[in-house]
């Protein structure tokens, strides 16, 4: 069943075309890799889906509804930047999410934070980039929604923390939840992907079932990435 449909989507910033005629259908219960180098349009696409940026033209339909304040409630979006108040302690960030989102599972957030060794008494300004990454993931995954969008969740995170984050994502997955994960660190993430979307200069250059693409091209997803973006 399709959870998300994107039809003839275009996005312009002044004279720059960020997204060009995007057409995609994303099914419920799958993990999608949104792959491409910096500047390919990954973040713009996610922000349009999340309702943070308005599209110039085209439609985005979630659960058979056009984007609105209602559909925003069905999406947990984790941006690349550190959006948390630096004056907050970790526990303040958890309280903020508890107050902000009726679907937020506070007990689950604390369970994850304990498991991944993020001290809830620490100030966010004192956390390393790896700990901030873990905190952002814990908050995003502790919501109970249909669609999770994680923008470059492995950026600035050390190798061991990447393994922790990947484990959290796979454990949070279920047949009722859909994930879109953007990254250019393809080798780290390809083993958990059901489908892939290669974005190049705002266009969908290639998309499809990950295993079918591996078989048809006789390459890993990382190998296909290198082929698609070799001149990017």
Image (cartoon, helix red, strand yellow):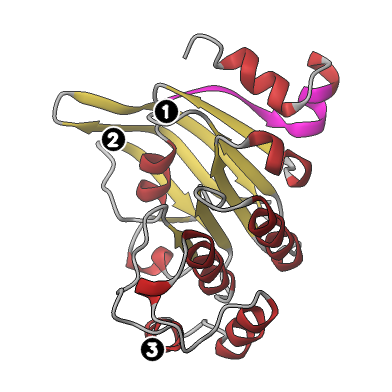
**Is residue 22 left or right of 105 when viewed as pictured?**
left
User: Who's the residue at 37% across and 55% down the image?
Assistant: 81
In the rendered view, tell whether residue 47 sits above or below residue 102: above
- The residue lying toward the viewer, choosing from 190 and 66, is 190
Residue 20 location (% of width, % of height): 37, 24
Q: Quadrant of residue 93?
A: bottom left
Question: Is label 2 in a helix, a strand or a loop?
Answer: strand
Circle 1 or circle 2, nearest the eye: 1
User: Who's the residue at 54% across and 35% down the image?
Assistant: 24
Mark sitting earlier along the chain (3/1): 1
Question: Is label 1 in a helix, a strand or a loop?
Answer: loop
Q: Quadrant of residue 188?
A: top right
User: Who's the residue at 42% across and 52% down the image?
Assistant: 80
Whether residue 206 is in magenta: the answer is yes
User: Who's the residue at 56% across and 66% down the image?
Assistant: 134
Farthest-out residue, left? 14
In the rendered view, tell whether residue 97 sits above or below residue 202: below
Residue position marked by numbered label 1 in the rendering: 40
Point out the stretch of residues depicted in magenta.
203-214
Farthest-out residue, top? 231
Residue position marked by numbered label 3 in the rendering: 99
Mark sitting earlier along the chain (1/2): 1
Instruction: Give neighbour class at mark 2: few <14, some 14-19, many 20+ (Cα, 10 Å).
Output: some
Residue position marked by numbered label 2 in the rendering: 57
Cα–Cα span, label 3 and label 1: 35 Å
- The residue lying toward the viewer, choosing from 125 and 51, is 125
């Amino acid at each position: 069943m399709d959870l998300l449909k994107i039809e003839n989507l275009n996005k312009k910033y002044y004279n720059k075309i960020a997204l060009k005629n995007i057409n995609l259908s994303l099914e419920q219960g799958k993990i999608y890799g949104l792959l491409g180098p910096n500047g390919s349009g990954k973040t713009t696409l996610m922000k349009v889906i999340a309702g943070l940026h308005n599209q110039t033209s085209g439609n985005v339909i979630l659960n058979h509804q056009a984007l609105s304040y209602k559909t925003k409630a069905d999406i947990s979006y984790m941006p690349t930047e550190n959006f948390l108040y630096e004056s907050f302690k970790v526990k303040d960030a958890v309280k903020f999410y508890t107050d902000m989102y009726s679907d937020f599972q506070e007990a689950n957030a604390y369970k994850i934070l304990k498991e991944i060794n993020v001290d809830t008494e620490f100030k966010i300004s004192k956390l390393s980039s790896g700990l901030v990454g873990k905190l952002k993931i814990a908050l995003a995954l502790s919501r109970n929604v249909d669609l999770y969008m994680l923008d470059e969740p492995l950026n600035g995170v050390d190798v061991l923390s990447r393994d922790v984050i990947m484990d959290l994502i796979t454990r949070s997955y279920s047949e009722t939840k859909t994930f879109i994960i953007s990254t250019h660190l393809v080798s780290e993430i390809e083993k958990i992907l059901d489908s892939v979307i290669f974005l190049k200069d705002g266009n969908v250059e290639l998309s499809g079932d990950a295993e079918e693409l591996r078989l048809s091209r006789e390459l890993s997803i990382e190998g296909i990435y290198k082929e698609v973006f070799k001149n990017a």
